[in-house]
Structures are given as C-alpha cells and as structure tokens.
Amino acid sequence: MLKVTGLTVHYGAIEAVRDLSFDVARGQVVAIIGANGAGKSTTLNTIGGLLKPVRGQIEFEGRDITGWRADQVAQLGLAQVPEGREVLAPLSVEENLRLGAYCRRDRAAIEQDLHSMLQRFPVLAERRKQLAGLLSGGEQQMLVVARALMARPKLLMLDEPSMGLAPLIVNRIFDIIAEIKAQGVTLLLVEQNARKALNIADYAYVLDRGHLAHAAPAAELRDDPRIVAAYLGEATRS
C-alpha cells in the first residue's frame, strides 16, 4: 500500500532522515521505533505532506505522492494522528469529529460514523458538546484517533499515541489500536513505547539517527538481544 524509497529530509542544515526505504503492506500494522531524534516523526510528517523531502520517493497505492500537500494526501485516504494530539481546542468534541470527515460527501454515512465513534468512545459521547481543549490528555488522544477514523482512512498513521499518558490510559489506547487492526485498517505506528508497539505490530523498522538500522517481523525484534538491550529495557516495560 505504501512504498518509501531513498527518503532524505533536512531541517535546514540538519539531515533528519537519510536514504530511508520501507514498505507497508495492506492490512498490516507496521511499527517504526527508535530513540528520540531518530527521525520517526519526521518520516510520518513527510509522508503526510507536512514536510518536503530533499530526495526520495513516496508511493501510495502505486501513485507517486512525493511532495504532495497534506490536504491532497488526505483526500487519497491517508490519515495522520499527529504527535501532541493537536485537537482544535475552541471547538466542541462533536465539531472536531465532524471535521475529520471534511473530505467526504456521503452525509448519511458520516452521521452513522459519528454515532459509531460516540459508541466506541463513551467518554466522548459524555463530552460531546464540551470544548475539546477542556478534555484530559487521554480524552484528547481518543478524540484525535476518532477524528482520523471519521475520514474512513485506507492507511492510518499514528504518531506517539501513548506519549504523556498514564499507564491505564496507555493500555486503553492500545486496546483501541488493536480494535482498529481487527477491522482491517492498515496502520503505520510511530511509538516511543517499543514494547507496546512490537506487541501489536506485524512488522517493524528501527531508526537510528535518521537511517534504517533494523527491519524484521515484530516478533523477531522482540526476541533480538540488541533490540531488547537498546529499546526494551525496564524503562519501556508496561
């Protein structure tokens, strides 16, 4: 579904990602893990059209989308949940959800999906008319995931969905990711909690200072002593 080839991205004179290549197969959950500053979020932001690559190619369903704007990428069915949640704070929970479907024109189906999201996330139903900026961190994370799902994406990119959340909320977020996976949605997951990511992913890539260090089925990386030592120590257990 997604093919990235030779991707190189700069921030000014800083090379954040260099010569990165990887694939995401339809129906899979693919995780990208690595230390802070490894280039994980940069990779997602470039795929999603928020950053422009210096070199390389991004193909989505066989179409070259390299350098496309974020709105153009979204219209193809590629949705991104950004790091830091990024709710539209002055708008209500319901208004945030409806904006997730801005590319769609099937009004009856949008109403059905809104109802479905409020059923899946009862806390959002309780706070439907509340300003999104007044939600807790965990509630905001649920909102941005639900908002992205309102687009009915073919590929959903999640950037650090557990960051800054309490352990119980982290578990709930990963339960939601498992539910999305079970529905057949293709997922590209960037996650600092490497253990959680590898437990749910089918395949995983490890970035180190902007380049690809390891690539293997997630189950293999969970048992790789190098990965365990570098990313799956006590600090990442949950």
Image (tube, rainbow, N blue to C red):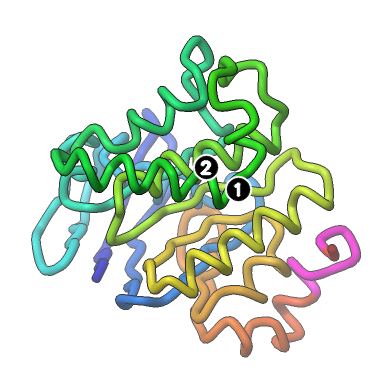
Label tally: 2
Residue 191: quadrant of the picture = bottom right
What residue is shown with label 1?
161
Q: Position of residue 229 (x, y in %)?
A: 80, 74
Where disc 1 sits, the SS reads loop
Q: Is residue 21 above or below residue 136?
A: below
Q: Position of residue 7 (x, y in %)?
A: 29, 56
Q: Is 75 covered by the magenta stretch? A: no
Q: Nearer the viewer, residue 40 or 10?
A: 40
Q: Main secondary structure of the magenta part?
A: helix
Say which residue appears at 23% left-offset and 53% top-offset: 77
Q: Is residue 98 above or below residue 180?
A: above
Q: Position of residue 237 (x, y in %)?
A: 85, 65
Question: How many residues crowd mark 2 within 10 Å: few (<14), some (14–19), many (20+)?
Answer: some
Say which residue appears at 30% left-offset and 45% top-offset: 151
On screen, residue 177 versus residue 9, left or right, reads: right
- Of the 4 image quadrants, the one containing the C terminus is bottom right
The amino acid beneath tag 2 is: Leu
On screen, residue 89 versus residue 34, left or right, reads: left
Farthest-out residue, left: 63
Q: Position of residue 212 (x, y in %)?
A: 47, 67
Where disc 2 sits, the SS reads helix
| Residue 118: assigned label | 2
Mark 2 or 1, nearer chain start: 2
Q: Nearer the viewer, residue 13 or 172?
A: 172
Question: How many residues crowd mark 1 within 10 Å: few (<14), some (14–19), many (20+)?
Answer: many
How far apart in space, not on screen, are marks 2 and 1 (Cα)? 19 Å
Q: Which residues are magenta?
A: 229-236
| Residue 223: assigned label | none
